[in-house]
Image (cartoon, helix red, strand yellow):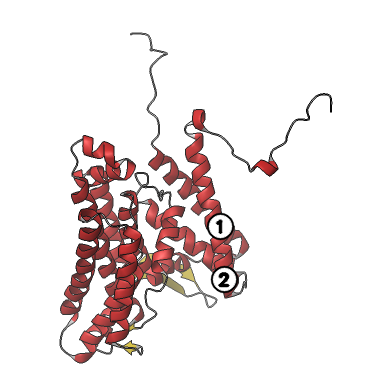
Amino acid sequence: MGALNPNKTKTRMSNSTLLFIIAGIIFLVMYGIALLTFPLSFKQFQTFFDFFNLNAALFIVTLGMCIVMIGGGIDISVGAVCGLVTMACAVLLESGAGDIWDALFLSLGIGLAFGLMHGYLIAYLEIQPFIITLAGMFLAQGLLTTLHREPLNVTKPAFVALRSVRIEIPWLGTVNRLGVFIPCEIRPGVLVVVALVIIYAIMMKWSRFGRNLYSVGGNRQSARMLGINVKKTMFFSYVLCGLTAGISGFVFLITTGAGNIGNGSLFEMKAIAANVMGGILLNGGVGNLLGAPIGTLTLLTINELIRAAGVQSNLQAIVSGLLLYIFIMLQSIIMSLRDRKNFRLVLPSWLKLHRPVEGK
């Protein structure tokens, strides 16, 4: 047997994997704190499943935003597009002009239209993503209020039947005070979330598009030198994000059963926050797509923990914002420590300790 080579280099863990592991640990810690603090609420399995049941649309929007952020972009129109889709589908179904399949194709069409428009303007005309998607947000909001200003409940029997579908997990549940076993339930939107997570994770891990997107997000100039079509890659990332926002709107409608001008409100901000908590860098090029649902779970756990503690709604946003500051600082410190040679803790001049001059 040959002797082991002591100089053999070990494979270094990637930044995406490191941040994903940290995001998973943070979620487990936060959920553990919730279990210890409010065991009656968080100990029930249904509470965990309700994170997905009630927020499936947010999970989906976060996945689309994750793809764009890995490519070094941003899309702040996804919440408005989601809201527009819910109202457009609600009007279509209530008017009797179409069925559920027509509403689904309409939602995909609206999301695809915004994705194509944003992708072309950002990738090929090289306009700043923030400006373009801000215009898209205003456009979607304007179209939403034009369609219908008041809440519109969908009463179509086929749609109501779809909303009522529940999938029971017979081996998992909670025993109530009367000693009756109540199995956990999941809604159709959860299946959509699981399917998209699997599809997008495979795409980002093993497809050429996924590898190219990481390269483009890391360094566009280097990506061009490697022969990657940067514009095409960026274009398709926004197309996917828009399409995902359309799917999210349809799932949102299934969850709530009504179109409303407030649907999808602040989804874009929540999606960005969830992705940051999931280990996706705003600079691009670093992040694991599975971190998107992990970050969403962390965000929802924090919000539910704050709500269970009886904190007022206006303070919930303050606490969430402060925690987001901490997550961003933590990411910055970790990424700096990965390259110790360039790591410096820079303090303002008025905080630096100046040595006294000798003789004075």
As drawn, which residue projects farthest toward the right? 360
Residue 82: in sight, yes or no? no
Sequence-first tag of 2 and 1 = 2
Q: Quadrant of the C terminus?
A: top right
From this view, report whether residue 46 is shown above or below residue 212: below
Q: Residue at x 29, y 77 (%)?
A: 84
Q: Residue at x 55, y 76 (%)?
A: 177
Q: Residues within 10 Å of mark 2 (few under 14, many from 20)?
A: some
Residues 82 and 100: in front is 82
In the structure shown, which secondary structural element does the residue marked by tag 1 occupy? Answer: helix
Estimate the x, y position of residue 252 in percent, counting from the top left: 33, 74
Instruction: Using the image, tell me which numbered label, if any, was put on residue 307.
Output: 2
Q: Quadrant of the N terminus?
A: top left
As drawn, which residue projects farthest toward the front? 360
At label 2, which amino acid type do we have?
A: Arg
Estimate the x, y position of residue 15 in percent, counting from the top left: 41, 39
From this view, report whether residue 353 is shown above or below residue 210: above
As drawn, which residue projects farthest toward the top? 2
Instruction: Using the image, tell me which numbered label, if any, was put on residue 323.
Output: 1
Instruction: Using the image, tell me which numbered label, if any, was put on residue 243.
Output: none
From this view, report whether residue 213 is shown above or below residue 317: above
At label 1, which amino acid type do we have?
A: Leu
In the structure shown, which secondary structural element does the residue marked by tag 2 occupy? Answer: helix
